[in-house]
């Protein structure tokens, strides 16, 4: 049923002009009545469809609102998002995915919400997630990896987000270690990786992605307006959240699969290509000292590598960096 509808949308989208019920029924190998029923379901999901006698059907506009159906229909993936849950409002998509993980839901399960009322960042910080303005989504992963490799998943996700933003716009995103995506020095996205693990094996990972997409000037809370922004504010254009999510999921799947097969090296290079202030000098505060250093890149364990003015290398796991 669902795959027929996906094919139906693909057929309708391919056409500039109308396509007849007869042609659709032949192409999809279903009856004319079934075609008509599918059209009614599409309308319920917000598609505007023009039906003209003797000419056929044409999609006039696709829905603005995200739904499970509209997200899954255009999604070209093998495992990610095949189980997908969409909610108008949740406390946090992270908590829902933890629950689904405990119920045994598979690798690649996705939860996405229009609004989060208790969206969270790292260390119980707040994540502002207003209705319909961004991507508030969590992905369940069940990687066969030791827990020490979990930080690589955060770095991988950051490269995926930077890549997709880069491809879909003229913006130049950068990745600020460890988990922020910046555009014009302001944070447009953050990643929260939570893990359930035994000593030597990850049980599951909940990967949270928050992206400010269509907020306008004045819609970012004043407390953070000096350091946060949205893709619309930076690009001047409204983004189609649905297509954006689909492209994040399919890029994520490809990147993840090649990471599992070929290892971290390519992610590392990609991360460093987008890395914020890589090659530049910053001031760093650790438990031991405050010092100036040049940022060199990342290590396979997720550490940030810096070289101080005496030429000594430092691997940073949890330092304060004065960007
Ligand atoms: C993050 O934490 O950047 C991780 C954000 C993860 C959010 C996603 S949304 C889907 C999933 N469900 C959740 O409940 N969470 C995940 P951190 O690096 O700790 O940054 C948090 C800090 O960023 C806050 O203390 C604010 O200063 C700032 N902030 C809050 N909301 C923001 C927003 N919408 N855009 C930019 N900065 C924000």
Image: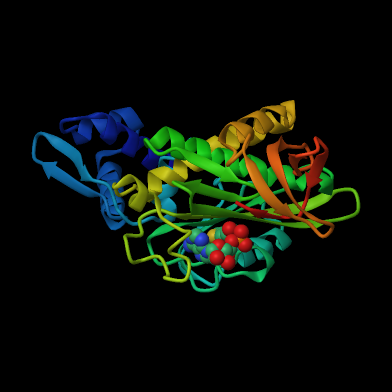
User: Which quadrant of the structure image shows residue 146?
Assistant: top right
Question: Is residue 284 shown above or below 157?
Answer: below
Counting from the top left corner in percent of width and height, residue 42 is at: 30, 50
Relative to residue 102, is residue 56 drawn left or right?
left
Counting from the top left corner in percent of width and height, residue 211 is at: 48, 54
Q: Nearer the viewer, residue 27 or 13?
A: 13
Classify the position of the N terminus by image quarter.
top left
Relative to residue 264, is residue 118 drawn left or right?
left
Relative to residue 20, is residue 35 drawn left or right?
right
Question: Is residue 157 shown above or below 217?
Answer: above
Relative to residue 204, is residue 154 drawn left or right?
left
What residue is shown at x 79% (from left), y 53% (from top)? 203
In the image, farthest residue toward the left: 53
Question: Is residue 214 shown above or below 253?
Answer: below
Q: Nearer the viewer, residue 312 or 76?
A: 312
Counting from the top left corner in percent of width and height, residue 160 is at: 56, 39
In the image, farthest residue toward the right: 199
What residue is shown at x 40% (from left), y 39% (from top)? 171
Identify the coloring.
Answer: rainbow
Q: Is residue 39 visible?
A: yes
Q: Nearer the viewer, residue 269 or 61?
A: 269
Q: Quadrant of ligand 1?
A: bottom right
Q: Is residue 78 visible?
A: no
What residue is shown at x 62% (from left), y 38% (from top)? 280
Counting from the top left corner in percent of width and height, residue 150 is at: 76, 47
In the image, farthest residue toward the front: 310
Q: Nearer the viewer, residue 62 or 299?
A: 299
Q: How many marks?
A: 0
């Amino acid at each position: 049923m669902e795959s027929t509808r996906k094919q139906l949308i693909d057929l309708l989208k391919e056409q500039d002009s109308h396509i007849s019920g007869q042609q659709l029924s032949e192409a999809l190998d279903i009856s004319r009545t079934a075609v008509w029923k599918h059209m009614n379901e599409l309308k319920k999901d917000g598609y505007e469809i023009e039906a003209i006698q003797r000419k056929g059907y044409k999609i006039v506009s696709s829905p603005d609102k995200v739904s499970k159906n509209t997200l899954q229909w255009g999604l070209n993936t093998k495992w990610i998002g095949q189980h997908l849950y969409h909610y108008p409002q949740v406390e946090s998509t992270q908590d829902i995915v933890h629950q689904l993980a405990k119920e045994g839901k598979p690798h690649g399960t996705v939860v996405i919400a229009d609004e989060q009322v208790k969206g969270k960042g790292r260390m119980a910080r707040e994540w502002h997630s207003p209705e319909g303005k961004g991507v508030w989504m969590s992905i369940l992963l069940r990687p066969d990896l030791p827990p020490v490799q979990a930080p690589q998943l955060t770095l991988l996700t950051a490269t995926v987000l930077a890549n997709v933003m880069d491809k879909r716009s003229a913006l130049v995103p950068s990745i600020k270690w460890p988990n922020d995506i910046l555009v014009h020095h302001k944070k447009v996205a953050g990643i929260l990786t939570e893990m359930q693990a035994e000593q030597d094996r990850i049980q599951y990972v909940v990967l949270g992605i928050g992206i400010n997409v269509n907020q306008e000037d004045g819609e970012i809370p004043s407390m953070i307006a000096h350091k946060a922004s949205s893709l619309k504010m930076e690009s001047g254009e409204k983004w189609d959240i649905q297509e954006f999510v689909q492209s994040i999921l399919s890029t994520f799947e490809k990147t993840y699969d090649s990471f599992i097969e070929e290892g971290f090296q390519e992610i590392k290079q990609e991360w460093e290509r987008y890395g914020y202030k890589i090659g530049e000098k910053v001031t760093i505060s650790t438990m031991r000292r405050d010092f100036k250093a040049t940022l060199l890149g990342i290590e396979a364990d997720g550490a940030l590598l810096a070289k101080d003015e005496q030429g000594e290398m430092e691997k940073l796991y949890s330092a304060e960096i004065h960007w």
